[in-house]
Image (cartoon, grey):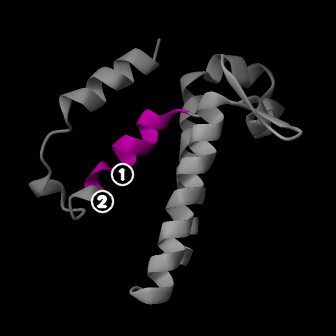
């Protein structure tokens, strides 16, 4: 796994990309909050928190056999373990106005990436 060194800090490439992407999301939301949409910055922080919790819960659910033997490991987020597909499936209705009758089927790419990430 390629690593990137920033002074005394060493990051794995994928984790640095995630940190930069989330930072850009929060920065943009804060700038838009100040200029156009009051409350957007706070909503972005809540969305980030909900996404991280949902991703962790999805990972724990996918690997419950391992976590059931030592439940304290559920809180060990620094060891990694986030599942993106449960969060994407949970957000699908909100991306389409939250009206279940009008929901289009999920894109095939989401199904394929979910199957690939389960392995």
Disc 1 element: helix
Q: Which residues are magenta?
A: 83-94
Query: Picture coordinates of residue 100 (x, y %)?
Result: 18, 55
Q: Nearer the viewer, residue 51 or 30?
A: 30
Query: Picture coordinates of residue 12 (x, y %)?
Result: 69, 28
Residue 39: tell me if it is visible: no
Q: Residue at horizontal 79%, vertical 31%?
A: 73
Q: Which disc number belongs to residue 91? A: 1
Callout 2 touching callout 1 (CB < 8 Å): yes
Location of residue 36 with respect to 83 vertically, above or below = below
Q: Residue 94 occupies which quadrant of the picture? A: bottom left
Location of residue 48 with respect to 114 vertically, above or below = below
Alpha carbons under labels 2 and 1: distance apart: 5 Å
Q: Is residue 8 left or right of residue 69?
A: right
Q: Is residue 98 left or right of residue 4?
A: left
Identity of the residue furthest to the right in this view: 8
Q: Residue 105 occupies which quadrant of the picture? A: top left
Q: Is residue 115 left or right of residue 40?
A: left
Q: Quadrant of the N terminus?
A: top right
Q: Is residue 96 left or right of residue 110?
A: left
Q: Residue at horizontal 74%, vertical 35%?
A: 74
Residue identified by numbered label 2:
94
Residue 35: tell me if it is visible: yes
Query: Picture coordinates of residue 2 (x, y %)?
Result: 66, 20
Prevailing secondary structure class for the magenta stretch in the rendered image: helix
Q: Residue at horizontal 38%, vertical 43%?
A: 88
């Amino acid at each position: 796994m390629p690593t990137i060194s920033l002074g005394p800090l060493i990051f794995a490439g994928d984790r640095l990309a995630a940190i930069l992407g989330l930072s850009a999301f929060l920065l943009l939301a804060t700038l838009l909050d100040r200029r156009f949409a009051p409350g957007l910055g706070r909503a972005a922080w809540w969305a980030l928190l909900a996404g991280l919790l949902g991703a962790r819960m999805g990972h724990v659910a996918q690997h419950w056999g391992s976590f059931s033997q030592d439940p304290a490991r559920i809180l060990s987020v620094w060891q990694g373990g986030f599942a993106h597909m449960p969060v994407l499936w949970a957000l699908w209705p909100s991306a389409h106005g939250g009206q279940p009758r009008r929901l289009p089927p999920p894109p095939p790419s989401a199904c394929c990436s979910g199957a690939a990430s389960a392995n």
